[in-house]
Amino acid sequence: MHDNLLSVVVTRKWQLAESYHAVELQTRSRSELPSFDDGSCVTLVLDNVICKERIYPLCCFTSRPGAYVIAVRQDDGDTDTKTADISLSQGDEAFIVTPRSPTVILDGRTQSILFAGGVGAASIAGIAKRLALAGQKFELHNFARSPERAVFREELDALKSEGRVYHHFGLDADRLEQATSHAMSPAHANTQIYCSGPPAFMDLIERQARDWVYPANIHKILLGARKRGR
């Protein structure tokens, strides 16, 4: 169980990309919500009794003090039940836990390579924004099944003046592994690697990154279902 759960209600829902939606959460009194850093995630508890909960990325580009906006994947009939998002509709009530900020290494002497897949693009966009604000260059690789399914593509492209941003669409497993391996090849031992997306995607990034950088330099932003009590 979590302490200090905050009750919220779904006030709006709109499409971000094919098969993905943004969901706005507010308190019933429209009171100000806890502040958060770009790239943060929030745990949503659908039922305080059974503790059905999932971690969602907070959309730094559209959230505001009185409302959080999270990115969710809708059930399009091709969703693995292990990774399927909770169904959320306008008017639904839920509880949230104070947002958790990912570790971001702000050191001009280090290189950063970022990898995003699915709604993980929201978290990676926030991390890239923090790096850009600190004046640090970065390389970002975003993966999606198609351009129509690319979440926050415009927001990522807006960061091209601060770092290198690449989009990869429709890659099968072999081509995905080749693309991520090629992106990793400039890495040095002190390079910082950030990734967020489906579990298999992040496992691939972590496995490849361990051949290039120190384990402590691999930062996985975990999303989706979390076990009770963790």
Image: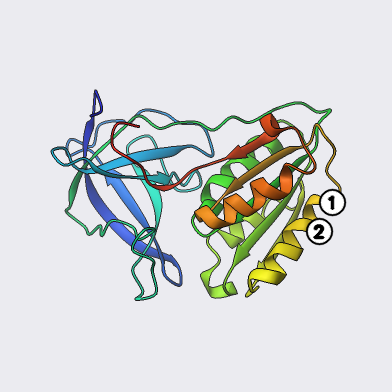
**Label of residue 182 in the image:** 2
- Binning the other alpha carbons within 10 Å of mark 2 as few (below 14), some (14 to 19) or many (20 upward) gives few
Answer left or right for 40 relative to 15. right
Residue 201 sits above or below residue 98 on the image: below
In the picture, the quarter occupied by the N terminus is top left
Give the x, y percent position of residue 6.
Answer: 23, 31
Q: Residue furthest toward the top?
A: 3
**Do tag 2 and tag 1 residues touch (Cβ < 8 Å)?**
yes
Say which residue appears at 50% left-offset and 31% top-offset: 101
**Label of residue 185 in the image:** 1
**SS at badge 2:** helix
Say which residue appears at 70% left-offset and 41% top-offset: 193
**Label of residue 213 in the image:** none
Q: Residue furthest toward the left?
A: 49
In the picture, the quarter occupied by the C terminus is top left
Q: Amino acid at mark 1?
A: Ser
Q: Nearer the viewer, residue 133 or 97?
A: 97
Give the x, y percent position of residue 170.
Answer: 62, 75
Give the x, y percent position of residue 84.
Answer: 35, 61
Q: Nearer the viewer, residue 178 or 26?
A: 178
Say which residue appears at 60% left-offset and 60% top-offset: 154
Say which residue appears at 65% left-offset and 46% top-offset: 206
Q: Nearer the viewer, residue 101 or 177?
A: 177
Answer left or right for 12 relative to 153. left
Q: Amino acid at mark 2?
A: His
Based on the displayed image, in which of its 4 quarters is residue 79 positioned? bottom left
Q: Measure the alpha-carbon separation of dots 2 and 1.
A: 5 Å
